[in-house]
């Protein structure tokens, strides 16, 4: 009988994309994705080591799975991702019912390790210290029929004192532009309308093959792929940001006017302690240049509150930058020590109560700014890529949800004479914003236009794209001659 699997993903977009690669490999190995409500024969936990309480979340999930494993002896449990890379054999010591532990550098080994664990009747732990197979060479079963992740690099060359990613993901390795473009074309061939270029530091892309302007060129080349309607990217590092990227964003119609650029702190003293190789003036100058070139750009950020040694003056400087930058939204985090990072060993750890109070002030300020910025959208007509699962209250409000080109979430009423049949996730609609909240917009008038898409057809049919791996190629720009990697039989699920 065919064995079934389920993958549970924790953490960042990179982990989400890694899980797509894991699903593709398991399907190639003869597994089938478990249906909702079905007890899978294999559960894969793709873990994160960056978020707070990551360890507790992992071992809590493993504790719940223990009963399932006891009731079904043939069931297998695999743990991968950043926490597996960090904890290694400690996982099977704490949870001996786990069958396989694999790291961030050997995603391709999962099917073999599972078979070996069954054959040997003992746990298999394999953690490599460096990349064995570039993830893009692996097949992928995509989660979305209309939007796809495309990794342009893995790893990070920065040494931020609060971050454990470089030690878990390794040094930056860049994909060749031809490979990236081939994967983009493969996704478009499957009906995908939007791609997001992924990297720990996307605007340092090209360092491995000696082209500091490679990322701007890549944006323009992706924008030239016929059939692709939206290009996004995450995340750039302010220190490596170059003006040619701003030009590429402004001059390439398919590149969305959305920028997520982590600030982390507005205090130059704290930025230095974090080993963030820029200062607040540099960050704000980039914001100004982006807004000058694209007045409609939505800029978002990450901010850490309570880094060791942060004073009230330091925190006030962060608030000043937030007021000046006017982010459309911000991911705000309370600092907590991550074992294995330099910051965890620093003196002057800030008391929890102080961090909480500062965090509350920051959130209140940012929410007020975001609300002001969103109110400015009322009355504007926006183009939405209709999404699935973005509106938790859509069923009770009889609305649907979608993302505007600037990344804002809009809940809309799917009515009007312009509606062609039924609106599906993956379709494109235009509608007018009628109401603003700090974290979303509402459009309660009739839809102004509705375009049915192949992506919407695939969603309606329950089909998800599948792409084969794209191998290493030459460092050249321009569209590849063929859509290498497209599944010749189209969507199979």
Image (cartoon, rainbow, N blue to C red):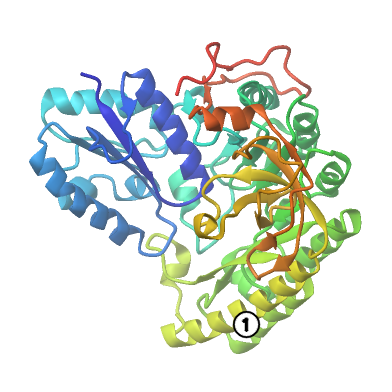
Judge whether 321 appears above or below 68 on screen: below
Q: Is residue 300 above or below residue 493?
A: below
Which quadrant of the figure has residue 479?
top right
Query: 363 left or right of 69?
Result: right
Q: Residue at x 76, y 60 (%)?
A: 433
As drawn, is 225 to the left or to the right of 438?
Answer: right
Q: Position of residue 487 (x, y in %)?
A: 54, 16
Picture quadrant where residue 253 is located = top right
Position of the C terminus by quadrant: top left
**Which one is in front, 259 or 429?**
429
Identify the residue shown where x is 27% and y is 38%: 43
Residue 286 vs 47, above or below: the answer is below
Left or right for 226, reference 47: right
Q: Residue furthest front?
A: 417
Give 463 or 362, whichever is nearer the viewer.
463
Residues 73 and 111: in front is 73
**How far across and how far down the image is residue 34, in percent?**
31, 33
Q: Is residue 53 left or right of residue 178?
A: left
Query: Which residue is disc 1 drawn over?
Result: 315
Indicate the quadrant containing the N terminus: top left, top right, bottom left or bottom right.
Answer: top left
Dot 1, how many residues are within 10 Å of its Cα: few (below 14), some (14-19), or many (20+)? many
Q: Is residue 241 visible?
A: no
Q: Is residue 187 visible?
A: yes
What is the x, y in percent for residue 158? 59, 52
Element assignment for label 1: helix
Q: Position of residue 335 (x, y in %)?
A: 48, 72
Q: Residue at (51%, 21%) from the top-left corner?
A: 491
Q: Nearer the viewer, residue 314 or 31?
A: 31
Write down the quadrant of residue 178 in the picture.
top right
């Amino acid at each position: 009988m065919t064995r079934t699997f389920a993958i549970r993903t924790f953490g960042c977009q990179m982990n989400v994309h890694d899980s797509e690669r894991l699903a593709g490999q398991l399907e190639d190995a003869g597994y089938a994705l478990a249906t909702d409500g079905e007890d899978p024969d294999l559960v894969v936990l793709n873990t994160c080591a960056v978020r707070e309480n990551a360890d507790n979340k992992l071992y809590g999930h493993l504790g719940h799975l223990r009963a399932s494993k006891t009731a079904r002896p043939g069931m297998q449990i695999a743990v991968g991702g950043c926490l597996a890379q960090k904890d290694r054999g400690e996982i099977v010591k704490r949870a001996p019912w786990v069958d396989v532990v694999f790291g961030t550098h050997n995603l391709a080994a999962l099917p073999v390790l599972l078979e070996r664990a069954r054959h040997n009747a003992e746990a298999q732990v394999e953690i490599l210290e460096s990349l064995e197979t570039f993830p893009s060479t692996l097949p992928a079963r995509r989660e979305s029929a209309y939007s796809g992740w495309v990794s342009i690099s893995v790893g990070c060359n920065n040494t931020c004192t609060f971050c454990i990613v470089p030690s878990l993901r390794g040094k930056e390795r860049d994909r060749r532009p031809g490979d990236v473009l081939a994967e983009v074309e493969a996704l478009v061939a499957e009906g995908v309308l939007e791609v997001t270029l992924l990297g720990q530091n996307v605007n340092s892309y090209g360092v491995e093959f000696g082209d500091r302007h490679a990322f701007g060129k890549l944006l323009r080349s992706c924008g030239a792929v016929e059939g692709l309607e939206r290009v996004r990217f995450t995340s750039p590092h302010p220190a490596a940001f170059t003006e040619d990227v701003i030009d590429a964003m402004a001059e390439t119609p398919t590149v969305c006017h959305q920028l997520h650029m982590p600030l982390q702190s507005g205090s130059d003293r704290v930025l230095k302690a974090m080993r963030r190789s820029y200062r607040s003036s540099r960050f704000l100058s980039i914001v100004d240049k982006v807004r000058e070139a694209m007045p409609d750009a939505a800029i978002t950020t990450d901010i850490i509150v309570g880094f060791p040694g942060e004073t009230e003056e330091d925190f006030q400087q962060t608030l000043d930058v937030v007021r000046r930058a006017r982010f459309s939204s911000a991911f705000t985090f309370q600092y907590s020590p991550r074992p294995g990072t330099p910051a965890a060993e620093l003196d002057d750890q800030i008391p929890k109560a102080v961090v909480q109070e500062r965090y509350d002030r920051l959130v209140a300020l940012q929410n007020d700014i975001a609300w002001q910025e969103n109110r400015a959208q009322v009355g504007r007509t926006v183009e939405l890529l209709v999404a699935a699962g973005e509106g938790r209250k859509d069923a009770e409000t009889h609305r649907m949800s979608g993302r505007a080109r600037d990344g804002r979430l809009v809940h809309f009423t799917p009515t009007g004479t312009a509606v062609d049949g039924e609106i599906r996730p993956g379709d494109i609609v235009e509608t007018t914003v009628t109401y603003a909240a700090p974290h979303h917009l509402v459009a309660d008038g009739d839809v102004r236009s509705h375009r049915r898409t192949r992506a919407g057809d695939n969603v309606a049919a329950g089909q998800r794209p599948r792409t084969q791996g794209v191998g290493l190629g030459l460092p050249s720009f321009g569209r590849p001659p063929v859509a290498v990697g497209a599944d010749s039989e189209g969507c199979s699920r």
